[in-house]
Amino acid sequence: MRVDFANAEAELGAARLGFAGALTVHKSADDSVHFEAMSVAPTRVPVSEVNRWLADPVPLDGLLSGEVRFDGHPARLSLAGELALLSESGREVVARLAGSGTVLDQGALEDVSLAASDLDYGLLRILTPEVPWAGSGDMTLRLDGDLATGMDVEIIGDHTGREGTQINARDPGSGYRLAATVEDFDLSRLVDGLPEPFSLNASATLGGRGLDLESIRSSLVLNADSVTIGRLVLDSVGIRARVDDDGLLQVASVRAETGGIVLQGAGSLGTVGEAGEGVVLSLSSPTMEPLREFFMGPDRIAWDELLPIEQTMMIQFEGVDPDTVPRAVDLRFGGAVDARARITGALAGLSASAAARFENLEYGPTSARSLQADFTLSGLGRGTPVLVDGTVSGDSVSFRDRRYRSALVETRFTPGGSGRVRALITRSDSESYDAQAVVSLDGGSGRVDLDRLTLVRDDRRWNLRGPARIEWTPDAVSVSNFGLIRPGTEGLRVRADGLLARGGGESDFALEVADLDLGVVGSLLQLEGAPRGVVRASLRASGTGHEPEWTGTVEVSDVEYETLSFDRVVADAGFADGTLRARMESWRGGRRNLRAEGSIPMDLRLVEVPDRIPDDPLDVQIVADSFPAAMLLGRLRSLEEIGGTVSGEVRLSGRPGALEPDGSLHLDDASAWVAPLGVRLASAQMDLDLDPSGVMAVNGSAVSGGTVDFRGTVGGDGPPDDIALNLAFWPREFQVVRRPDIEAAITGDSLALTGTFNLPFIEGRVEVNDGTVNLEEYQRTAELIDFYDPALLSAATVQGSVSDDDWAGGVGERSPFLQNLRLLVDVHVGRGNRLRSRRMTVVPAGDLELTFDRAGSRLIVRGEMEVVRGDFRLGPSTLNIEDGLFTFPGTPGFDPDIDVTAVTRARTGDGEPIEITTSITGT
């Protein structure tokens, strides 16, 4: 019987199934059915409908579309076609499959080729659900052979090719032998959760039987010559292991090497029940340097190891923020390591113990002469929470320049759950800190039950008043019964209790502090230049998390901090409706010398906000009454022994981004030693008148040998970071420098400083009086220091505008004022000035034109100086210089042409007077 199909079609709900070709049914038993160019074309047919006709249903969901063609009879059936597996919605293609080949009798295959494109590797979880397959790609499968005895299989994917493989396809667990080779295979593209990249070049053989832990009996040999796991690059990896007939995993060897650091191990484990002596892994190396890139990242540079010019170029041309670049101490990494781990139990449930010792450890800002870590882990692979029990101890421990004799941390916890933690830190025989708590973590929430907090320093001891609790959730922070006291009737008292709302709940929180010694706090924190004083404070919080309200007071007595010194500082503040209203007063010698009060916009919600100080209106009034100038100017690097006072009143209004100051300040009888210049300023007076427009009028005078008067304006229109300058100076025999290499006083008429802070310009005419240049000392300084270096220029000009901390951090080198300074000054060298050296002393006179462009690194001196008189020592004789000329041709640098004449008067053997004239020329 023959049946012909001519574009027949069957409807299955929304799906269709098309048929074409011929089907012949014979009476003989051998070839009962014969297909002739038979094709079946499903259109969006559910896989569930297909499964109804299959002996072994396919565990897939989705829709099938495409065409499959048949030719031949069951003993030799040729197949070809293309199919697409769609998502259940039909909108996405999960996989495309194209193939051809022949199915023979008894399950044999001949030249079968299947090519999958756009394959969602998640489908492979059907075969191996324990592997988190991910990603997509292409795969080609070629099969040839007898299913009953094994067949040749070739699989080619995006990154893999497996050849020479035999597998019993009817029952894979009954026996298998696999050989695989991969090149640049990135497993992280296939399996979720792996570090990226996870690539390897490797070969492996796997043979045996059984696919589950109870039945598996197999062996594995893996060798890799290059493995990259994230930033970790392993030079080689090797594993030799087998599961014997007793179900014991025998690990003959495990070895991994990177940069000479070798991890190796061996041992045995049970597969289902506990058995074997365990697998021991060990690692030992005198240096961890080969692991630097893995822990610290590649090619990182340290800001403080760059040259100043490199720092400047990175800031100006690359827009680098120096605060985001690590310092050398942040990139430290090194030390010796000796570690050992032992894994016991069975693959179905493992336990592990590990011990590691580090010598001369350095890891960023943390270091230790020795560090010992001991941990045990239980519950691995059992489906129960893993329990971690461990101890970390170290001696000569340092963290961000804070040094401790020893540190000990003990913990027993469940990752992601809770556990007990204890920390004991010893700084010296008389100082230690001890804390113990139960910590619970759950995503963005957590709780700390603090059992112990003890601080011991010299003869003082502070400890908890009782058990305390701190809890936090996304909506609130709660503090219960926290109290820190010094036992006895006097001394420190800190109490905190209540709720701080982050969301819509109500806050009810109180903090009380009494007799807090800032000197002790600074010592505990190992702060350089720690403040001194005793604090009493209180704080109350109420309102909702969205609209919080705060009130507080603080009083500090006997305050000492760097240049600040007060008998008492008091302040009170309140916050509500997005505004902080505060008042502060400082007292010294029974007199109030500073008062500040006003309102400032702030956002004190306990959540992340774009800006804690919004650009909204503010109003602050500052009143100074004989406030010590040393407290304001003492942080300036170059000024010492500062005297004088500041008085006045200033009102700040406007917005934080555009302040409008109004008022005046007066500096009275100020004095200071300017160390870099070697001069003392005295009797300095200065009036500053501030205008809301941003223009500040300056008028003042100072004494240094002679006097200098100055006046003008600073500020005005323009960006706030580029202040306009318009100042004039009138020096009268004013001593500007008195150092071993040079000293000079100047007189001038309207020496002007104009331009802006970022592009300043100095011009005018000055006369140098009573100046002396010691050439050897000057030359020695020039050899040691680059005179174009802004750091040196700062010392001679405005170095005093930079604090010690900022200078150490490189702010001086980055000052745009110094980087872009330009000068055009006419210098008249009058009589009374001297050039000195070991052989020569001359008195010059003349006029020079000095041009200096810091940005262009160019100093040009043009003009002539006449030698009025002088002497030149030549051996035991002294030559009198009667005339000569120093000529500066206007070329970059300081190298004049010299042409002088010297005369020596002597007598002959007969007593007749003679004169010897010597010409000295050169540069």
Image (cartoon, grey):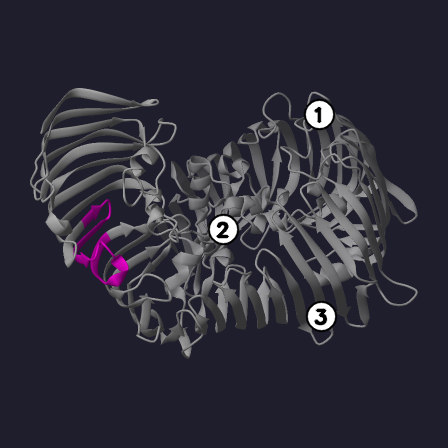
Q: Which mark is residue 326?
A: 2
Which numbered mark, 1 or 3, is in the foreground of this view?
3
Residue 656 coordinates in the image, percent (x, y): 69, 29
> Left or right of 415: which side holds 586?
right
Counting residues from the start of the chain, the first of labels 2 and 3 encountered is 2
Q: Which mark is residue 893?
A: none
Q: Is residue 907 visible?
A: no
* Mark 2 secondary-structure assignment: loop
The image quadrant where one finds the N terminus is top left
Looking at the rendered structure, the kind of residue marked 1 is: Asp
Counting residues from the start of the chain, the first of labels 1 and 3 encountered is 3
Near mark 2 (Cα within 10 A), the count class, few <14, some 14-19 or many ≥20, is some
Which numbered mark, 2 or 3, is in the foreground of this view?
3
Near mark 3 (Cα within 10 A), the count class, few <14, some 14-19 or many ≥20, is many
The structure residue drawn at horizontal position 53% and vertical position 66%, both measured from the top left corner, is 367
Residue 702 coordinates in the image, percent (x, y): 72, 39
> Left or right of 43: which side holds 285?
right
Q: Is residue 62 above or below residue 704?
A: above
* Mark 1 secondary-structure assignment: loop
- The residue labelled by disc 3 is 432
The structure residue drawn at horizontal position 40% and vertical position 43%, both measured from the top left corner, is 896
- The residue labelled by disc 1 is 616
Q: Is residue 179 magenta?
A: yes
Counting residues from the start of the chain, the first of labels 1 and 2 encountered is 2
* Mark 3 secondary-structure assignment: strand
Looking at the rendered structure, the kind of residue marked 3 is: Ser
Q: How many marks?
A: 3
Q: Is residue 762 visible?
A: yes
Q: Which residues are magenta?
A: 155-183
The structure residue drawn at horizontal position 33% and vertical position 58%, both measured from the top left corner, is 233
